[in-house]
Amino acid sequence: MHINNNVQHELNKDTHIEEKGIILNSNEIILYNLPSSSNVYTKIFARLLEDSRVVASYKMYWLLGILEEVNLGNIEITFKRLVARMLTAAWYPTLQYKLYFGQFDNLVKSINYISSIYCVPTNINNNELLEFICSLDDNILNKQMKDLTNNVPYMLLTPFFDDKIKGTSSSKRVRKIIELSLSESGVLYKIIKDSNNIVMDEDWAIYMKSNYKVIKSWIYYKLSCFLQKRNPNVPAIIFKLDPPISRSLSKSTRIWTSIIADRNVKDIYTGREFSRENYDELGVLSIDHFIPWSFVMHDEMWNLVPTFKNINSSKSDKLLRYENYIDDFCDIQYEAFSFMCDTNRKKDLEPYVDILRLENPLDFYKYKGKEGFSEKLKTSIAPIYQIAVNQGFSVIDKL
């Protein structure tokens, strides 16, 4: 069902917005305030995701699913469609970034089931994944998806009915919320239990579509706070809510090409030289993140090493056994650091200045040398490596 023409016309109008800015997506963060409106009670909307009301990620992902459907012009939405959106939105945070959702959260169970039973790649396109999940007729998955709707469609609406459901026993609360959603005006949506779907209030649909970007950024903020509490040592949570954006390592490739031409460096994973014969056998030069990019979420030079394309593909987002490779890693990193010092590449030295906390990299290079460099780099990288292990990134002995 789509929004009628009158509503669609209203969706094109701007609602009054009191904001300092927006978060366009999880990769572009700007401070913002939730929009206000004269047609809906936004103070209740702001209470939907209060910390005291959130014990799992379901409410954030359910509301995000509603927002995406409304943005497409849909106001009648099935439970299954919304749960499929929940699973799709949590796919990358779970499988690629290995975030922990807490012991009360069963989204991960369904995601792992789909991934393993149907051999779905972790980097699948979101739209493809959504339609694939919606198309499945799997009794086990259907049961899991149904279980995910036992509470969230109803509990999300409790701020609209706090006074009217106060004192209602938990066994009767769901029925009461369904009845109130159908009889009360100004509620976010009506719950049609017989067909397991919701019907959006038209004013709320207008509000959500008109302010799509701001509301999405607010949900992301709430979700990132929720996940940060459960992943306290994991960096860049806000950047791990979406599929990764395309990145270029062309600058790093140019730097490593110059280093290889100037210094006697070998691939730390195979011990092979970077020669034409080895390129023909193992693939062209390829830049690898020693600690997986999907954990660190950056392309800083101190975590990058040159290898061969086939070797890089084989390593993927796995970790190599620390004690087996850390010395070779530090050796090749020192070659990069010394090359930059010798050629006075001050800009390229900045990542090392940051990670090693150097006041003057040239003086450090002159007086501390390779031993001092390796000691500092190990001190900096060891805890990052261990956190990645704790987060669930696979460790292999060799390639």
Image (cartoon, grey):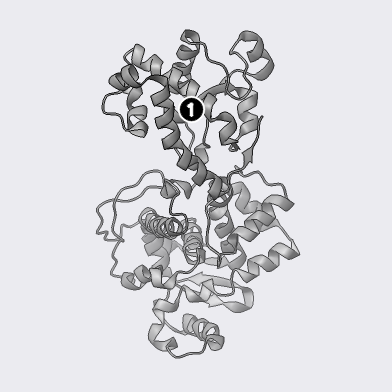
Q: Is residue 103 left or right of residue 164?
A: right
> x%, y% of residue 55?
48, 69
Is any atom of residue 346 visible in this view? no
Q: Name the residue located 40 percent from the left edge and 14 percent from the top edge.
A: 339
Dot 1 amino acid type: Leu
Q: Name the residue located 41 percent from the left edge and 43 percent from the top edge.
A: 27
Query: On the image, which quarter does residue 364 sit in?
Result: top left
SS for callout 1:
strand
Relative to 160, does residue 91 appear above or below in the rendering? Answer: above
Q: Quadrant of the C terminus?
A: top right
Q: Is residue 397 left or right of residue 215?
A: right
Q: Quadrant of the N terminus?
A: bottom right
Residue hosting label 1: 304
> x%, y% of residue 87?
58, 57
Q: Name the residue located 32 percent from the left edge and 51 percent from the top edge.
A: 22
What count of labels does the image hold? 1
Q: Nearer the viewer, residue 373 or 281?
A: 373
